[in-house]
Image: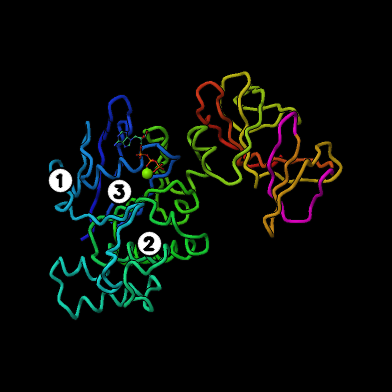
């Protein structure tokens, strides 16, 4: 039932705007892939082309190896949940959930069973008899998601389906949606600009910027081995620290000197000499006592704190367990170089360096 989706050199132009540029991407059967990127990067346009609401300017879309060119949306056997989701306001939640099944000719008893099951999963059982126009945002959004999932489409497209929900609901719905998707083995293309959503639900994440695919990989790969500066900075919260550094190479080794540290050996590899960026995530810096770097201020997250530490004219963000430092303290800093990235200041590419596996 579930389908494989392939996008080949897909492109969409609106007059001067290139909304999507040569996008190639493939989703295996049962795979959950997120399109992640800032506003205007072409996520919704991509989804609309797969759904059949926009015609590509170039390139092709294949479902199970067959081009869907020219097929109207209703013939693409795709389930869709949009940012501006639609719920029939005059129908009950039950009727809303049953609508797609009825259209597919599913019998009454089977329909009732499926509606009951999806309602339980989405916490809608108490609302089954409520009319669509009596629901709050969160309830409506869950009905919109339920309506699509219950029909078990071979391909599910979701465009920011949780954007109107509060944080707690989003968190619980993330887990629930992932479970349903796994159970039904659905192929899902999920659009979001929320990295937590993408990281927590996806098998793979496709990061886009200005219509172009920047990288596709597992959440771990995208976080630990970003290919370029855009991906490195877009993923991670608080964002990665980019520290100005001077690169020295010799004997196949790459080392850097920063405003506060000399000769940090990153590993084996090659890198163009000169000034580049050393990327270190806020979780990969340890603080110690008796150093020379002043803590300018701190933000409490609860169990952890974000320290803003002055380092050679810039502020580094460092995540530490709460209570390790106070405003005005001077601390020493230790970078976990196994996890450091060296980013070419000219091309913005992350340079390949084979780490020696030491912290320094
Ligand atoms: N119908 C249209 N006519 C003209 N330009 C459009 C049209 N639809 C989208 N665009 C442009 O194409 C680009 C990509 O838009 P798109 O809606 O795909 O971005 P998005 O990644 O979904 O953003 P958001 O996160 O804000 O929803 C934008 O520059 C947008 O202004
Ligand atoms: Mg959009």
Q: CA distance from mark 3 to mark 2?
A: 25 Å
Task: Choose between 256 and 282: the one closer to the eye.
Answer: 282
Label 2 CB less than 8 angstroms from ligand 2:
no
Question: Which residue position is annotated with label 3?
Answer: 27
Which of the marked residues, 1 or 3, is nearer the chain's N terminus?
3
The answer to whether 260 appears left or right of 90 in the picture is: right
Q: CA distance from mark 1 to mark 3?
A: 14 Å
Are there few (<14), some (14-19), or many (20+) residues within 10 Å of tag 1?
A: few
Q: Position of residue 60 (x, y in %)?
A: 20, 37
Which of the marked residues, 3 or 2, is nearer the chain's N terminus?
3
Q: Is residue 215 placed above or below 347 in the rendered structure?
A: below
The answer to whether 145 appears left or right of 167 in the picture is: left
Which of the marked residues, 1 or 2, is nearer the chain's N terminus?
1
Question: Which residue position is annotated with label 2?
Answer: 141
- Quarter of the image with the N terminus is bottom left
Residue segment shown in magenta: 311-328
Q: Position of residue 165 (x, y in %)?
A: 46, 59
Question: Which residue position is annotated with label 1?
Answer: 66
Task: Choose between 143 and 229: the one closer to the eye.
Answer: 143
At 76% from the left and 35% from the top, the residue drawn is 310
- Quarter of the image with the C terminus is top right
């Amino acid at each position: 039932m579930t389908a494989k989706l392939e996008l080949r050199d897909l492109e969409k132009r609106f007059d001067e705007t290139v909304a999507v540029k040569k996008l190639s991407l493939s989703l295996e059967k049962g795979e959950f892939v997120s399109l992640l990127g800032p506003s205007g990067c072409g996520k919704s346009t991509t989804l609309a082309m797969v759904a059949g609401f926009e015609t590509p300017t170039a390139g092709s879309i294949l479902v199970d190896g067959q081009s869907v060119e020219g097929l109207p949306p209703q013939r693409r056997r795709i389930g869709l949940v949009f940012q501006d989701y639609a719920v029939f306001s005059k129908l009950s939640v039950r009727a809303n959930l049953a609508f797609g099944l009825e259209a597919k000719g599913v019998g009454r008893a089977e329909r009732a069973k499926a509606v009951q099951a999806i309602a339980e999963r989405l916490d809608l059982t108490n609302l089954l008899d409520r009319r669509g126009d009596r629901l709050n945002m969160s309830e409506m959004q869950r009905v919109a998601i339920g309506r699509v999932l219950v029909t078990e489409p071979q391909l599910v497209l979701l465009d920011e389906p949780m954007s109107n929900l509060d944080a707690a609901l989003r968190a619980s719905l993330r887990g629930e949606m992932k479970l349903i998707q796994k159970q039904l083995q659905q192929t899902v293309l999920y659009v979001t600009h929320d990295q937590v959503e993408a990281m927590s639900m996806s098998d793979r994440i496709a990061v886009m910027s200005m219509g172009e695919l920047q990288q596709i990989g597992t959440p771990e790969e995208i976080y630990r081995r970003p290919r370029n500066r855009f991906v490195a900075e877009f993923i991670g919260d608080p964002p990665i620290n980019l520290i100005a550094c001077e690169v020295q190479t010799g004997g196949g080794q790459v080392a850097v000197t920063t405003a506060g540290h000399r000769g940090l050996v990153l590993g084996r590899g090659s890198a163009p000499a000169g000034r580049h960026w050393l990327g270190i995530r806020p979780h990969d810096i340890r603080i110690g006592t008796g150093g020379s770097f002043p803590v300018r201020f701190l933000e409490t997250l609860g169990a952890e704190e974000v320290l803003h530490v002055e380092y050679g004219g810039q502020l580094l963000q460092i995540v530490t367990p709460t209570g390790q430092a106070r405003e005005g303290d001077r601390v020493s800093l230790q970078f976990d170089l196994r996890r450091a990235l060296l980013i070419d200041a000219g091309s913005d590419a992350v340079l390949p360096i084979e780490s020696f596996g030491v912290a320094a």
